[in-house]
């Protein structure tokens, strides 16, 4: 780690740790609260009940989501919204995306780009599982669909967006964030991701906007911290890196293209919305070195571990089985992981689509992204592999609806 970042960390910790006794007491209380929360989650799993809230898209469309369900989503920081797309239509998209990838020679090009001298080795693990594909028609159709727009409005409105300086973001309109697609084959062992959160690592302690967001936690008053208060959320400055999302997302998420559930090499979550408070206070305890934040590194995801965060890790659970057209969503401060091995029988495929509402931060990125779309290049946050420049069947301006154009800032 660069010395300048180390000194930022030392300085931030010096300021944040003025009242060490208070932070120690607060952390112990929080540790007990998180253990109780994790126990509740595991008891729910043991009883065979869903520990991640679920609802049907129809309830959103009909304005029939209960306050209890909203409260539960705010508590868990995650939700499965089923039936955003019809199953048959989603299965067609899955097929179409597969054809787009193979007919345009993605696998051969991928081997060339890796500099390998032979066609993929025949081992399942030699083939890519995440594709640098952003502009296939199925992805564009999913992003610009009206049902997806309704879903995002519902999610954005779980946040409290009005602050003293006006709205932090527009909950009813969004910019698209073009992301990749995962197509994970049975038996794959290459794609596991250890528990982490995205959208900021050491910045969560050092950046002035993050310090305001987590003000009450840093003051030891973690009970007053509200994960859903949007104030300052679009003002944070992240360390630039290909692993970091340049847009503010109210929720990360994906749309399932195939059925997938526990042991199918898919998503796990620690569904505790204020778990971030534990991560923040843990790093400010006496047993962590002055230039260390429990291993937080610039430009990388913020890792959670059994070593530093055992009470939170007890709450790690797999998502329930989802069907084609169902969607999964989690707050940007939720710890998540991808199972190491795919033990299931079918592909587990998803299209990543998060909720990225209109705000100045997202407008800046949307302008760069629109240019990449028009030229068929990779989206600007990602490695410039530019696979799709000469792909047949790529989505173009003509494929965008009015909503789709607005979402692209075009
Ligand atoms: Fe992630």
Image (cartoon, rainbow, N blue to C red):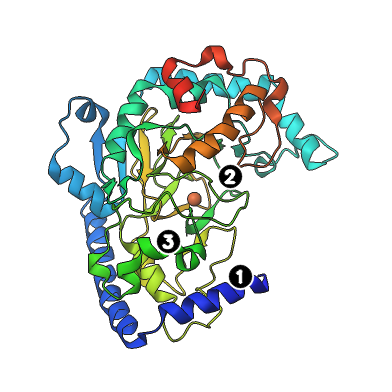
Q: Is residue 134 left or right of residue 286?
A: right
**Residue 223: mark in rendering:** none
Q: Would you say the beta carbon of the disc 2 residue lies within 8 angstroms of ligand 1? A: no
Q: Which residue is mark 3?
A: 210
* C-alpha distance separating marks 3 and 2: 37 Å
Horizontal side, residue 78 vs residue 4: left or right: left
Q: Is mark 3 within 8 Å of ligand 1?
A: no
Q: Quadrant of the N terminus?
A: bottom right
Q: Which residue was labeled with disc 1?
A: 5
Residue at x 48%, y 20% (from the top left corner) = 405
Mark 3 or mark 2: name the one nearer the start of the chain.
2
Cβ–Cβ below 8 Å for labels 1 and 3?
no
Seen in the picture, residue 79 relative to 172 is either above or below; the reply is below
Residue 94 percent coordinates (x, y):
50, 24
**Nearer mark to the viewer, of 3 and 2:** 3
Q: Write down the residue under mark 2.
A: 188
Q: Local crowd at mark 1 within 10 Å, few (<14), some, or many (≥20)?
A: some
């Amino acid at each position: 780690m660069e010395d300048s970042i180390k000194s930022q960390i030392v300085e931030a910790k010096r300021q944040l740790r003025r009242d060490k006794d208070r932070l120690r007491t607060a952390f112990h209380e929080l540790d007990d609260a998180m253990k109780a929360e994790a126990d509740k989650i595991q008891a729910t799993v043991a009883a065979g009940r869903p520990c991640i809230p679920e609802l049907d898209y129809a309830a959103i469309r009909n304005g029939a989501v209960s306050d209890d369900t909203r409260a539960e989503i705010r508590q868990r920081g995650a939700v499965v919204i089923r039936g955003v797309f019809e199953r048959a239509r989603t299965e067609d998209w899955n097929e179409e995306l597969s054809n787009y990838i193979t007919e345009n020679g993605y696998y051969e090009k991928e081997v060339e780009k890796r500099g390998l001298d032979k066609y993929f080795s025949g081992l399942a693990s030699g083939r890519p599982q995440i594709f640098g594909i952003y502009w296939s028609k199925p992805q564009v159709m999913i992003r610009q669909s009206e049902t997806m727009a309704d879903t995002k409005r519902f999610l954005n409105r779980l946040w409290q967006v009005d602050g003293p300086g006006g709205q932090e973001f527009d909950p009813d309109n969004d910019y698209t964030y073009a992301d990749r697609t995962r197509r994970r084959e049975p038996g794959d062992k290459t794609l596991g991701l250890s528990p982490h959160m995205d959208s900021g690592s050491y910045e969560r302690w050092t950046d002035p906007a993050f310090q305001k967001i987590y003000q009450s936690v840093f003051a030891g008053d973690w009970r007053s911290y509200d994960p859903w208060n949007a104030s300052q959320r679009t003002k944070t400055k992240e360390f630039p890196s290909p692993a970091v999302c340049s847009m503010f997302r109210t929720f990360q998420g994906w749309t399932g293209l195939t059925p997938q559930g526990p042991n199918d090499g898919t998503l796990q979550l620690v569904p505790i919305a204020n778990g971030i408070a534990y991560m923040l206070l843990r790093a400010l305890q006496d047993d962590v070195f002055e230039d260390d934040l429990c291993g937080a590194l610039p430009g990388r995801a913020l890792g959670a571990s059994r070593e530093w965060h055992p009470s939170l890790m007890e709450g790690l659970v797999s998502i329930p089985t989802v069907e084609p057209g169902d969607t999964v969503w989690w707050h940007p401060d939720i710890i998540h992981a991808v199972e190491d091995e795919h033990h299931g029988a079918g592909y587990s495929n998803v299209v990543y689509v998060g909720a990225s509402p209109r705000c100045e931060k997202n407008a800046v990125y949307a302008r760069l992204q629109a240019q990449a779309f028009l030229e068929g290049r990779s989206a600007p946050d990602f490695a410039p592999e530019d696979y799709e420049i000469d792909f047949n069947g790529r989505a173009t301006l003509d494929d965008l609806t009015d909503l789709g154009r607005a979402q692209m800032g075009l």
